[in-house]
Structures are given as C-alpha cells and as structure tokens.
Image (cartoon, helix red, strand yellow):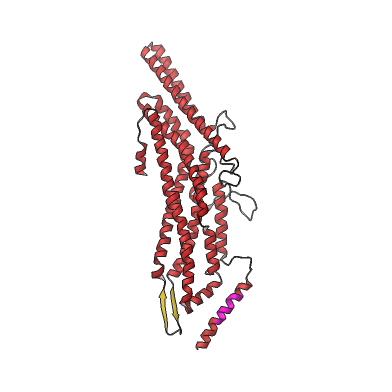
Amino acid sequence: MYNGKILFILALLLVVPLLYSAEDPTKSQTYTYYDNLNKYLKDQGSAFVAGTDAYVADVGVPVRTVPSVFSAVVNIAKDGECGDSWATYGPDFIIGAWLRPAMYASIMIVMGLILLYMLAQLLQSQPLVSTVKEEAFQTMMTFVRVLFLVGIIAAGNQWYGLSTANSVNDAIYSNSKNVVIIDAAMAFSRLMIVDMVDNYSMLTLYNTILHTIYSSTLWIGITWRSMYQFNLGAIMKPLVDLVGLALQFLGLAISEWMLHLITLCLIKKWVWGLLIPLGMFLRALPPTRGAGEALFALSFALAVIYPIMFLVDYEAHKLMSYHLADAKNAIGGFLSKSGILGVAGVLLIVLMVTGGVFVQFFIAGALSIAFELVRNSVYYVVLMSLLLPFFNIFITLTAAKEIAKFFSVDVNFLSFMKII
C-alpha cells in the first residue's frame, strides 16, 4: 500500500518535467489571461495618457475606442471636453478662442460706461460724469490685469516649449497635444492614474493568490490515515491584512488623482470661460470690487501656479520612480518561478502535501513580492497622493492670498485647507 503511494508521488515528479518540456519554451509559464491583462493595461493606459485613440492589434491601426478601464474619467479627458487649448494664437481669430468670453465681457463693460456717460451728459450731472471717469480708470486697470495674466500664461507656455523641446522619449513632453502647461499637467494626472491602476491590478491578482494559500488546509504525515492538518492562516494573516490595507488606500489614491484630473479640466474650461469674465463684471461695480479682486487673484493662482506645481511633481516622480519595482515583472516572475498558475502547480501541491519543508521557500518568495508591491503602494499613497498634493494646494492658495493682498484685498484662501 505504501509502495503504491510512493510510486504515485514519484510518477508525478517525473510527469511534471515532461509536461514542461512539451510546452513551447518561448512562452511564459503563466496563464494566457495574465499576459493578455498586461497587454490590455499597457495599450489602454498608453492611449489614455497620450489622449489618443487606443491601438487594436487585430485592426492594425488606431481606432476610436473607449478604454473601459478608465471609463470613469476618459469622457472628460478627451479632446474638446475641457475647452480650447491655452495657446497664444488661434487658427480662426487674432487671439485664441479661449479669450473670447473675456473680450465679450470687456465689450459689455465698455458699452455700459458709454451709455452711462451719455446719460450723464444728457442730465448735465457733473458728479455722474466724475463717477464715469473713475469707473473708466478702474475698467482700464481691469484690462491691465487681464493682459498681465495673458502675458504670464504666454510666457509660461513659451518657457514650457523651450524646456521640453529636446524631450523626445518623454511620455508627456514629447506628446504634440501637450503644447501648454495645463495640458501637460492633465497628462501627468492621467499617467498617475494609469500607474496606480497597474499596481492595483497586480496587487489584486497577488491578493487572490495569497488568499488561496491563506484559506487552504494542508496535510502532512507518513500515511493517509495518520496525517496532521494545518493551515497558514495564523502566519499569513499580517501579510494578508497588509496587502488588503494597501489595496484600500491605493483605491483612494486612484480616486484622488481622478479628482485632480477633473479639477484641472474644470480650471482649463471655466477659468477663462467663467471666472475671469465674472471677476471683470464684479470689479466694474464699486460695491463688489473687492470680490472681483479676490476672484482675479484666485483665477491667477489656478491658471498659473496650480498647473506648474504638477510639472514639479512630475519631475520629482521621474527621479524617484527608478527606485520602484515593476509590478508586472514582479508578479510575472513570481508566477513563472513558483508555477502556481501553471503546470508546476501540481508539483507544488504534491510538495506541500508530502513535506512541509518546501512551504517555507514558497512563503519566502511570496513575502518578498508582497513587500515590493506594498512599497509601491506606500509611494503612490503617501508621497504622490498625500504630501505633494498638499503642497500643491497650499502653495496655490498662498499665492492667491498674496496676490489679493497686493491689490489691497484681505482674503484668507487658506481656510479652504480646513475643508480639504
């Protein structure tokens, strides 16, 4: 009886290598699902970061497709949804189409002053004439503020173009669609979403494998009648809890960067489409002039300071990302070497059943992969989603407060930090 069981185990040990030799040596020793998942994430992620159509291998050319992985944010990130690009010149007008709302507001304010001046002359009211002259001067100062903001944006975009002209292989700077700073900031937000989704996907796959081992009952003994059963739940519980916690916080980090992307989209679409014209109208009226100044200061900070801070974050990310582990290669190597998803899984099960000494080698490999994936999650959650965004918002609101103070308006924008 015992000889039969021993022969059965030896047969398995001999059959498994034969099965390996029968497979195509050029293929990875993992499931095809894993390879297809990596390719899908890579293709869809690259298209999402670049802001272009996804590439479909069966067709051979870029086609119109919505990356389903990023369907929650892709609609607000495609061309035209976030307004016209903040370029200095437009194709069908002397200045860019993004400045047209401000121009319409300027025309309406000037027409209102003209009508008011005509009324003052008709009524022969000298105080009203003086008021019109004072408001004309304030309107001129409003135009100066708008032109100054346009000049700062144009200078910043010119600096961005010169600084990134030689960045040929850069995922963001080499993209012809990112011609201005705010477009590059939105591309960086998409890049962070893609990187975090990749790590989240690999961590979820690893968590599935980990829970399979965690909940499995192992048997060890000499005979089938007198065997001891045990499981690795008590040993692996801290590791399982750590991976689960990393998944939760990484999911929150992905949501946060989606919010960053939406915020940049709203800034690009509504700063010149709503905030600047509204600030011009508020500043044209004496009772609301202070509110107009505060709105101008906030618009300046959102249009200039906030996008530049994302470029600073991107430069910091490029320097620190070299120390991160490649989640796809780490999981792929673990699956291939352990064979848990391949033919070697049969051998692994036999070794776990017949000798507990082999379990520790498997757990050691799983533990090292877990630490690499968790380290990536800590980087994306703590540094890229907590510290750097905090500094971005703090510097932006501080700049808005100082700009408003320069125009003799005391507004405490930092109160928004308590809400955030």
Position of residue 284 measured from the top left corner of the image (x, y, whole percent): 41, 24
The answer to whether residue 271 is magenta is: no
Say if residue 256 shows up in the picture.
Answer: yes
The answer to whether residue 16 is magenta is: yes
Q: Which residues are the magenta region? A: 10-18
Q: Quadrant of the C terminus?
A: top left
Position of residue 184 measured from the top left corner of the image (x, y, whole percent): 53, 42
Identify which residue is drawn at 43% across, 61% down. Answer: 243
Q: In this picture, is 354 found above or below 169?
A: below
Q: Nearer the viewer, residue 328 or 96?
A: 328
Residue farthest toward the top in the current orientation of the protein: 124
Label the magenta part by its dominant secondary structure. Answer: helix
Residue farthest toward the bottom in the current orientation of the protein: 1
Q: In this picture, is 135 found above or below 251?
A: above
Q: Nearer the viewer, residue 366 or 57?
A: 366
Total residue callouts: 0
Q: Nearer the viewer, residue 164 or 122?
A: 164
Give the image quarter of residue 250: bottom left
Q: Nearer the viewer, residue 261 or 335?
A: 335
Identify which residue is drawn at 52% across, 35% down. Answer: 156
Q: In this picture, is 118 found above or below 301?
A: above
Q: In this picture, is 22 found above or below 134?
A: below
Say if residue 292 shows up in the picture.
Answer: no
Horizontal side of residue 390 vs 163, given as left or right = left
Position of residue 91 measured from the top left corner of the image (x, y, whole percent): 59, 32
Give the image quarter of residue 85: top right
Position of residue 199 measured from the top left corner of the image (x, y, whole percent): 49, 56
